[in-house]
Amino acid sequence: MRTGVFLPNWIGDVVMATPALRSLRTLVDRERGTLVGVMRPYVAQVLAGTEWLDDQLLLGRKEPAAAPLKKLGLDRVVLLPGSFRTAWLAWRSGAKERVGVARDLRGWMLTTKLFEPTQRGRAIGVPPIDSYLNTAYAAGGDWQPPTLELATTDEDEAAADEIWHRFDLPRDGSLVVLNSGGAFGAAKSWPPEHFAELAKRFAGDGRRVLVNCGPAERDVARQIAGDADHPGVVSLADWPTADGWSVPIGVTKAVIRRAGLLVTTDSGPRFFGLAFGVPVVSLFGPMGPHATRTHSPLETPLSLSLDCQPCEKPVCPLKHHRCMRDLTVNHVYSACQSRLATRHAA
């Protein structure tokens, strides 16, 4: 029995899919079958080091996908994303069993359908981690706790060792990692000057601070470290990489795995921290904490709950961005101190 699973495209959603992957692994082990992941190439970087998948099919954004899928000879396809396109590809794959949420007019292409809960005729949003697990259960997977899980490779860890050596970073779990920005849009970003002030406060407490950055966040990371103006605050903005542009996803995982605290916007690295058991303080603006609830006791979600939240827009439609600008450094720093105190008490 060959089972294919379509993985989500957003990095955070991929991490939230890991409990579902564990569940599907139990299914294919019982059947003595194989589990094939269908995903974008960068998704494979997120899952690198894990052992749930027996094989993978990497699909580019624009390249044809139906023919490669058909060649896999899949008996079952499990659809974690809710898009029409993934259901269409599953239907075209020739798999006799197709499992997924019946939404966006795709229900006719599914053989096992899940339906979103409604209230007064409107769909109630189910956090992805729960939706993915429910889909795995519908396919026949065993119950799994909603615990996020990731791994790193030896190559990732070797690269992190170089970073630790270059910046002389602590290995006792006291490092604070800051993560700004996110692919969703500017509305999720906490102001760089806020991050800089927070970094300066941690450095004043004697803690080392490392500013992480993705491909589009190098300038912001430089600004945060520069404005903090403290030898205890460094950034990865100018760390040399193979492409000269961005820190690889695997290295980001290895860096966050070694942190004692992660302060982050609602972006992919937030989920890395939780998957590696790192305490996380998450800053929410246009998206509410409930939308991507993780059930993790390690997470402290912060949101002002303004009347305009959640707007779910990539750019503030009211032009004031108060949901993030008014989230003060004092508020965030206090939450961080509480999070750290809880960890030390444990």
Image (cartoon, rainbow, N blue to C red):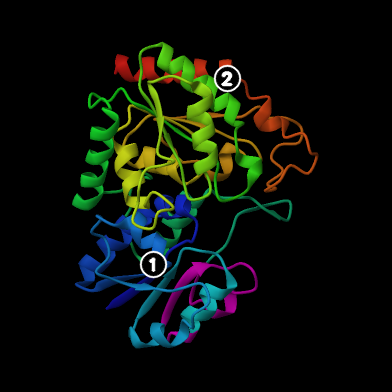
Residue at the spot of label 2: 329
Give the residue drawn at x 54%, y 80%.
Answer: 88
Q: Is residue 68 above or below residue 124?
A: below
Which residue occupies the extreme top position in the image? 205
Question: Mark 2 and 1 residues: CB-CB less than 8 Å, in contact?
Answer: no
Magenta region includes residue 97: yes
Q: Quadrant of the N terminus?
A: bottom left
Work out whether residue 273 can be spotted: yes
Give coordinates of residue 228: x percent, y percent.
50, 22
Give the residue drawn at x 39%, y 49%.
Answer: 247
Q: Nearer the viewer, residue 100 or 204?
A: 204
Q: Quadrant of the C terminus?
A: top left
Which residue occupies the extreme right position in the image? 318
Give coordinates of residue 313: x percent, y percent.
70, 48
Task: Give, as a single range, the part of the protein colored magenta.
Answer: 92-113
Picture quadrant of residue 123: bottom right
Three-letter amino acid code at disc 2?
Val
Q: Is residue 73 above or below residue 339?
A: below
State left or right for residue 27 relative to residue 270: left
Give coordinates of residue 78: x percent, y percent.
42, 69
The number of discs equals 2
State left or right for residue 230 relative to residue 55: right
Q: Is residue 199 above or below residue 109?
A: above
Dot 2: within a 10 Å radius of its alpha carbon, few (fewer than 14), some, or many (20 or more) residues? Answer: some
Residue at the spot of label 1: 139
Give coordinates of residue 170: x percent, y percent.
26, 25
Q: Nearer the viewer, residue 24 or 261?
A: 261
Residue at disc 1, secondary structure: helix
Give the residue drawn at x 55%, y 41%.
Answer: 181
Magenta region includes residue 108: yes
Give the residue drawn at x 80%, y 39%.
Answer: 318
Three-letter amino acid code at disc 1?
Ala
